[in-house]
Image: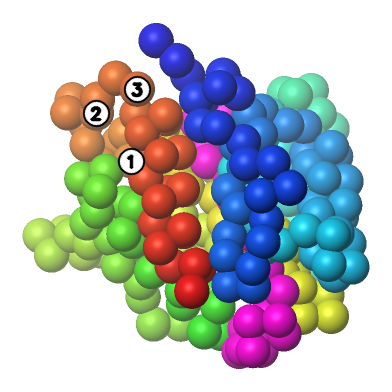
Amino acid sequence: MSSISDRTAVPVAPLARVAREGSLEVEWRGEVAYAEALVLQEDALEARRSGASGDRLLLLEHPPVITLGRSTKSENLLSGRESLAAAGIDVFEIARGGDVTYHAPGQLVGYLIVDLDARGDRDVHAFLRRMEGALEEALAALGVPARTLAGMTGVFVEDARSPEPPRKIASIGIGVRRWVTWHGFALNVDIDLAGFENIVPCGLAQVEMTSVAQELGVAAPAGLRDRAVSVVRESFLAAFTA
């Protein structure tokens, strides 16, 4: 059985295949340390700006790490850095929008490197809504109805029977440099949700974090991580290929 840590699970698209504006190449990178992923993103961003590559979606996982976006409030980091380090959790202050979030194995992270100017659409809010829509489509394919909530970027579980507190299943935080986007989304597939106890996720004290596995319960299928990679790939190709 393949797993999400197997780089052969989803074929990596070579850069040479990037051709026209409005296309998107999706690459599965496996588990990548956060510091390495920052370099990977910087290289991808510069390649996009120079025209050496087209728009790309980098799919990967991270070892346990907490990231602090530009809007992070110090009180939303609930554990001290020494105790986090002792638990093997790194902390990075980064240039994306949003507050604090947590990454770990079992969470599918997507870094979307897209030239908005080349696409003729500098509407960052519309770009975020398109990302949310792609995640909703992927979650529907996984058997988890999802929705967005007014005033809260990200994707939440659709549950008319128990709407409160809202359950968040995917977070979004991006950066934009000269109209090229970077950073992206984090979809909780079968991540250990206990890691979120170290933070107020995205600064939203009124929400709970959930995952695809938790929402499916005993129905969570074998190979869920590989399936998540596949459906996210297809939903983003549909959303970002003209």
Residues at marks 3 and 2 touching, judged by CB atoms closer than 8 Å: no
The earlier-in-sequence mark between 1 and 3 is 1
Frontmost residue, 196 versus 9:
9
**Callout 2 secondary element:** loop
Residue at 38% from the left image edge and 69% from the top image edge: 133
Residue at 71% from the left image edge and 81% from the top image edge: 118
Above or below for 30 versus 207 = above
Three-letter amino acid code at the position of disc 2? Ala
Three-letter amino acid code at the position of disc 3? Gly
**Callout 3 secondary element:** loop
Disc sitting over residue 220 in the figure: 2
Q: Which residue occupies the extreme left position in the image?
A: 161
| Horizontal side of residue 61 vs 139, given as left or right | right
Q: What residue is shown with label 3? A: 223
Above or below for 186 versus 8 = below
Residue at 17% from the left image edge and 28% from the top image edge: 219
Disc sitting over residue 212 in the figure: 1
What whole-number distance in Å separates the C-alpha atoms at marks 3 and 2? 9 Å
Residues at marks 2 and 1 touching, judged by CB atoms closer than 8 Å: yes
Q: Picture coordinates of residue 134 (x, y %)?
A: 40, 63
Q: Nearer the viewer, mark 3 or mark 2?
A: 3
Q: Which residues are magenta?
A: 99-124
How many numbered circles are shown?
A: 3
